[in-house]
Image (cartoon, grey):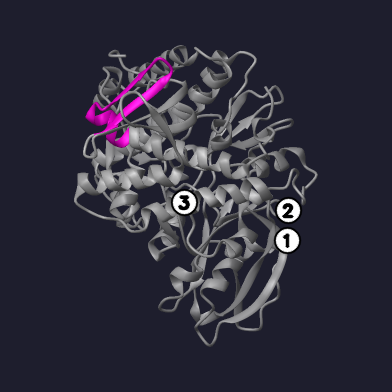
Amino acid sequence: MTDTVSRPRPRLDAHRHADLAAAHAVLGCLVREIALPDGDVTVAAGAAVLRLRHLDVALRCAVARISPVGAHRYTGPVQLRLDGDRWTDLDASRLAELVAAELTARTGRTNDEFIGQVRASRDAVTRLLAERPDRDPTPTGEPAIDAYVDSEQSLLFGHPHHPAPKWRSGDADKWRAYAPELRTAFRLHWLAVPDDLVAGAGPFDAMVAALDPPRPPAGHRVLPVHPWQLALIPPAHPQVRRLGPAGVPVRPTASVRTLYAPEADLFLKTSLHVRITNCLRKNARYELTGAVALTDLLSRVPTPAGVALLTEPAYRTVDAPGADEAYGTILRTGLRPHLGPGETPLLAAALAAAPLPAVDPVPWWRAYVELLVPAVLRCWLRHGVVHEAHLQNVIVVLDSDRRPVKMLLRDLEGAKLDTSRWATWPDGVPSQAAYEPRDARRRVVYCLFVNHLAGVCGALADARPGIEPQLWRELGAVVAAVAADLGDPPELRALLRGEPLAAKANLLVRWQRDADRAAPFVPVPNPIGSRR
């Protein structure tokens, strides 16, 4: 199998390529969240045709691959039906205008940001396509780590089911220096915080020593901060000093605000007051304390061989009003302890972003799902721990033959506890880490099956057309084996009987301008169960 994240990129007409990608993303959201649940879409003769019922107009787009969960791969322009059987091409901007009109009529609410965000996301992709270096300008020389960094920085188009996946608040000229897609590297900026203003937990100083920090003045401790954040929110407390840029280079990962230091093999999850996709990316105090508390708790939750958690054992922030969320930094453990000779870590989202060739895709897929699925389902149903194992939260380790041999789970902000499985709430874990049973089921089903496995399955099917039904059958067999091992829990029994899967409605939550935690979910077809 080849390294899919090194595929050639189209250079000609970057704007047209970006506009098509933007239109396909908006259309994919429209199909999944509106037309499919309402029964207003048909896929036949190589095209998806859907109706905007409140506008009484029809749209269509050619389909290169039909997905059993409605995550089709579109090709060519989105078109609007005119009189009779005449169709006209729509660019992403015009499509966004139609979608905005439909959603206004449907919800009774308006959103004066939406069309501009779709356009800005498209324009950002245009810039990324035009300016991305052909090669990493600052490689480490360690092939496995360079491949990992490349996978984190390869996602030029972003989430395929988000209406504005590359929209970021702030001036584009400012964020360009910190864009992972442009293969950037930079140095952290450091603050010196007086001892009596330091809040934190865990071995923070011991861990950041690998970053080669500057020496703080007497009575102070160092705090690494994203340089973009300091440009947005300069230190307001008179006793906090700037020490400037220093230390080993860091690389922004796909999340933008989480940074990886290859030399130190350390991740830093920084606060960044920038809206990326749905949320302002700041670390609230409960997220800081929760990372360390969950690290301690999850160290006692077993995971099967081949699956590990990147823990978050330390944080530090400024203990002053307004500064705690502005400068809170979480430290996350690195990759090298989990890698054997010849093994390569890759972000799962990079595997799903393009056709994924495998010499024999069925055994490859079976190895993949047998690592990931039992681990996530058992953590949930046996231990009450919900891992949001979506494509950006899982690092896949491939052996020298490019076969999956390990899965690394990350980001404890997304880890939650199912309240129905915890009779006593664990000490130190914030209440925001609680999920009611319905929320726990939705998040597991969406993140694991709809976001993650449907994406990787589709990438394998793009490389080997027609194989997708067999891959879903293999997945169903793995779920059935886990269900049998766990005593046939009702949650898995429902999946195996064909109960619809759940998908997070990114279009609707963006339209309603709600917090991400309040995102609605919509049903999507279930190819795992018996009613396929």
Instruction: Name the secondary structure under disc 3.
Output: helix
Horizontally, residue 504 falls left or right of residue 222, namely left
- Look at discs 2 and 3 and give the one toward the viewer: 3
Outermost residue to the right: 141
Which circle marks residue 263 in the picture?
2
Q: Name which of mark 2 and mark 1 comes first in the sequence.
A: 1
Q: Name which of mark 2 and mark 3 comes first in the sequence.
A: 3
Gap between marks 2 and 1, in whole Å?
A: 7 Å
How far across and down, in percent of the image, does residue 204 sit?
58, 63
Residue interval drawn in magenta: 32-52
Horizontally, residue 290 falls left or right of residue 313, namely left
Instruction: Work out which quarter of the rendered image holds the N terminus and state it.
Output: top right
Which circle marks residue 119 in the picture?
3
Could you tell me the amino acid type at mark 2?
Answer: Glu
How far across and down, in percent of the image, does residue 173 sit?
60, 63
Q: Name which of mark 3 and mark 1 comes first in the sequence.
A: 3
Q: Residues within 10 Å of mark 2 (few under 14, many from 20)?
A: some
Q: Is residue 465 visible?
A: yes
Which circle marks residue 31 in the picture?
none
Residue for badge 1:
248
Residue contact between numbered discs 2 and 3, judged by CB atoms under 8 Å: no
Gap between marks 2 and 3, in whole Å?
A: 38 Å
User: Is residue 36 found inside the magenta-colored segment of the image?
Assistant: yes
Could you tell me the amino acid type at mark 3?
Answer: Arg
- Look at discs 3 and 1 and give the one toward the viewer: 3
Residue contact between numbered discs 2 and 1, judged by CB atoms under 8 Å: yes
How far across and down, in percent of the image, does residue 98 sit?
33, 43
Q: Nearer the viewer, residue 406 or 3?
A: 3
Instruction: Name the secondary structure under disc 1.
Output: strand
Q: Nearer the viewer, residue 435 or 127?
A: 127
Q: Residue at x 62, y 18 (%)?
A: 358
